[in-house]
Image (tube, rainbow, N blue to C red):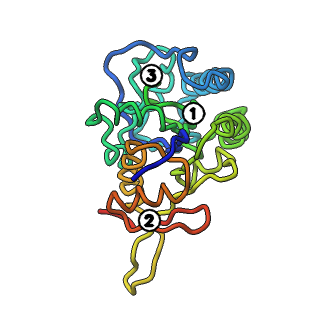
Amino acid sequence: MTCHDGGVLILLPPSESKHAPARGKPLDLDALSHPELTPLRRRLIRDLQMLCRRDAAGAIDALGLGPTQFDLVVQNAELDSAPTAGAMRVYTGVLYAALDHPTLTGQALRRVNARITIVSALFGLVRPTDRIPAYRLSGGSRVPGVPSLPGYWRDAVSAQVASHRGLVIDMLSTPYSSFVSLPPGAITVKVWQQGPAGQRTAASHFNKATKGHLTRALATCGAISHAHEVLDVAREAGFDAELDGRRLDVMRVE
């Protein structure tokens, strides 16, 4: 299939499960992509660390943790000194397992690293090669002094996404879709599954795996600049897909 180079940008959610690097450089905020977000990152990390260092019980409640997850409070308290690794090594959830970034090489790897941006509750936006530590902060977490994390990030993250000159593909989960106002022309991916009576229902568990497989197909193919090319790539990768306006409907894969 022939596509035209439009510099596609694929927005992914982070994963709750993360790999904590055993070694690596400490966090360097000035080295991350999207440097315009650095002041917001610095403030949020400071406030999160202060919470976790001074009020462990309050941190457990604010972060939605269980009583046996105190280690995650300690992890957050050490964000500024903890080892870092590339974001694709740190995020380990179902979507990222399906994307299978470690097996990519050559041009496919370069395309994935250039096309994917991850919406993060802690960093706003991160690229696959940005070095970050493991952390615990979800879209619905509460940090003292921050009314809501979506509200904290929305304007700045939306401005960064809007500055992208090319097609934007939205793979975000519900908590993170409120972190960004999508630019005109963006395509949102919706994953469906067949219900017991043959009806189409929103996929739940398989949603993440399907998005991971589809992301790999879209991020490693030739250049994409139009909605119909996204549909073509999805179908050629074996997905049962169709366009409904600016929404790409995809049936789940197991």
| Residue identifier under label 1 | 125
Q: In the structure shown, which secondary structural element does the residue marked by tag 3 occupy?
A: strand
Give amino acid for label 1: Leu
Picture residue at 57% right of the left edge, 62% below the top: 247
Residue receiving disc 2: 250
Mark 3 residue type: Arg
> Badge 3 is on which residue?
131
- The x, y position of residue 194, in whole percent, is 39, 76
Q: Residues within 10 Å of mark 3 (few under 14, many from 20)?
A: many
Q: Upstream in the sequence, badge 2 or badge 3?
A: 3
Give the CA distance from mark 3 to mark 1.
12 Å
Of the two numbered discs 2 and 1 in the rendering, the one whose residue sits closer to the viewer = 2
Q: Quadrant of residue 157?
A: top right
Residue 146 horizontal/vertical position (percent): 71, 35
The residue shown at (48%, 41%) is 14
How far apart are the two marked residues, 2 and 3, measured between alpha carbons? 32 Å
Under circle 1, the secondary element is strand
